[in-house]
Image: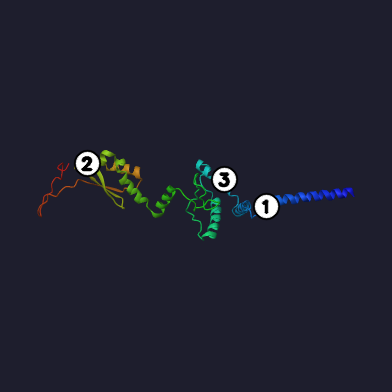
Amino acid sequence: MSRLNKNEAGSATAGQRDSAFKSVTAPEIAPQTPIGRVEAARLAAAERNGDILALRALDRAREAAFRRGDIKTRLPARADSRRSLAGTRDAASDGKPDQLGDDVATPGPGWGDVGSGPRPSHRDPHALADILTRAVKDFGWGHQLDMAAVTARWEEVVGPNVARHVTVVSFGDDGVLTLQASSSSWEAQIKALLATLHARLNAEVGPNVVKQIVVQGPQRPSWKHGRYSVPGRGPRDTYG
């Protein structure tokens, strides 16, 4: 009887300890308290999105490996799986599939939490240089930019001395570059160096951008009077 009483007393004591422990710990994790709501939200987010911190750490490691050159190209299986995951997420959000031509960008340090989700996506912020490069490619502005580079970098291409006496008049879409010399002597010199100038332009702005170079002399008045005239020897050094 004494042993039975001791066992009953021990079980009663253990039950009291359990009930006391539950009475102390239950309010701390109750959903009604602020801590309980935060914990419930964290558990719900982890269940819905997975381990976000681990995914971000893995993404940073992959980005660092790519910058070091350890990863040269994206594997097809990895790209297909990423596109399928992104496509599923996009279909659930806005119904638009993942754009296959867009590269997946990872926000750099200091950007904060600016991603569109726990996984990398084409909807995440991109660097401005990447956006401009993609816009030039999509709208076909490459040839126009090459043409503008010839005019903007003319002094750098031919040198300051030549640029003072030979200027760019026009550069058409057909690849014809029209130049104007300040004097007839400079006109003759540039015409003699057309092959060298063409090679220089190909090296600076790319091949097949400038297809033909036309050199014009200085602006000069016409000395023809009447219906009949005899061809002369040209302007010579009268205009420089």
Give the image location of residue 200, x and y in percent.
32, 42
Q: Counting residues from the N terminus, which is met first, the one under dot 2 or under dot 3? A: 3
Out of 230 and 239, give the one closest to the viewer: 239
Q: CA distance from mark 2 to mark 3?
A: 64 Å
Q: Amino acid at mark 2?
A: Trp
- Residue at the location (58% across, 49% down)? 52
Q: Answer with mark 2 or mark 1, whichever residue precedes in sequence.
A: 1
Picture coordinates of residue 83 (x, y %)?
53, 54
Residue, far right: 1
Judging depth in this view, the residue of 180 and 206 nearest the camera is 180
Give the secondary structure at mark 1: helix
Mark found first going from the N terminus, 1 or 3: 1
Q: Position of residue 213 (x, y in %)?
A: 27, 47
- Point out which mark residue 169 bears: none
Q: Nearer the viewer, mark 2 or mark 1?
A: 1
- In this figure, which colouring scheme has been used for the structure? rainbow
Q: Amino acid at mark 1?
A: Pro
Contact between labelled residues 3 and 1, with CB atoms less than 8 Å apart: no
Residue on which the image places disc 2: 186
- Residue at the location (22% across, 41% down)? 186
| Visible residue check, residue 209 | no
Identify the residue position indicated by label 3 in the image: 57
Determine whether the residue tagged by mark 2 lies in a helix, strand or loop: helix
Residue 151 makes an appearance in the image = yes
Compared across the picture, whether 91 is left or right of 182 comes to: right
Q: What percent of the width, then of the height, locates residue 218? A: 19, 45
Q: Residue at x 27, y 43 (%)?
A: 194
Q: Which residue is mark 1?
A: 27
> In screen coordinates, is 70 left or right of 220?
right
